[in-house]
Amino acid sequence: METVHKIGRRKTAVARIYLSEGKGNITVNKKDFKNYFTTGTLQYKIQQPLMLTENLESYDIKVNVFGGGITGQAEAIRLAITRALVAINEEHKAVLKPEGLLTRDPRMVERKKFGQKKARKKFQFSKR
């Protein structure tokens, strides 16, 4: 099996993963993923597609991720891993799609508009 390259995005975070056969090592920005993502919740999010398809120790994953915060980065990695697993085996789609892991979360920060304080907030209006 050759290396599978996929991209996942969430907010402003972009994750590029390289998935190849191995022993289950996950490397994020040249660090072990448990050192990069210190909380258990974020570690679970990354491993979720692998757990659901029972491939936790089947593949080595090398991740380059940048932009956004750590939660956005973890969810971007999750989407990329999910896409890679579906590319390898189409049958995984039946397990991953009901969990909502194949859906790209489109919510982004709305831009600030001129003549206003923030995206939606206006300056205080004075009638007199």
Image (cartoon, rainbow, N blue to C red):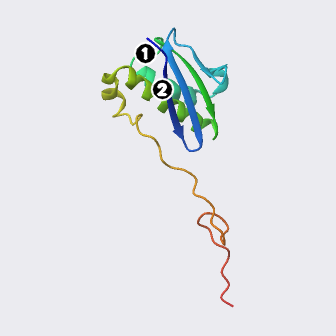
**Which quarter of the rendering shows the N terminus?**
top left
- Mark 1 lies on residue: 55
Tell me the crowding category of disc 2: few under 14, some 14 to 19, or many 20 or more residues within 10 angstroms, Cα based. Answer: many
Residue 98 image point, x, y percent: 33, 34
In whole angstroms, how far apart are the C-alphas of marks 1 and 2? 11 Å
Q: Seen from this angle, which residue lies furthest top?
A: 23
Between 104 and 48, the residue placed more toward the observer is 104
Q: Nearer the viewer, mark 1 or mark 2?
A: 2
Residue at 33%, 28% in the rendered image: 93
Residue at 58%, 66% in the rendered image: 120
Q: Counting residues from the N terminus, which is met first, the one under dot 1 or under dot 2?
A: 1
Answer yes or no: do the residues labelled 1 and 2 have beta carbons within 8 Å?
no
- Mark 2 lies on residue: 81
Q: Amino acid at mark 2?
A: Ile
Q: Tell me, for residue 11, which label it has, or none.
A: none
**Which quarter of the rendering shows the C terminus?**
bottom right
Between 126 and 22, the residue placed more toward the observer is 22
State the SS at label 1.
loop
Residue 115 image point, x, y percent: 66, 72
Residue 88 image point, x, y percent: 39, 20
Q: Seen from this angle, which residue lies furthest front?
A: 2
Q: Amino acid at mark 1?
A: Asn
Q: Is residue 27 above or below residue 6?
A: above
Viewed as shown, does residue 10 lie left or right of 32?
left
Residue at 38%, 34% in the rendered image: 99
Tell me the crowding category of disc 1: few under 14, some 14 to 19, or many 20 or more residues within 10 angstroms, Cα based. Answer: some
Residue 118 image point, x, y percent: 65, 64
Residue at 67%, 20% in the rendered image: 31
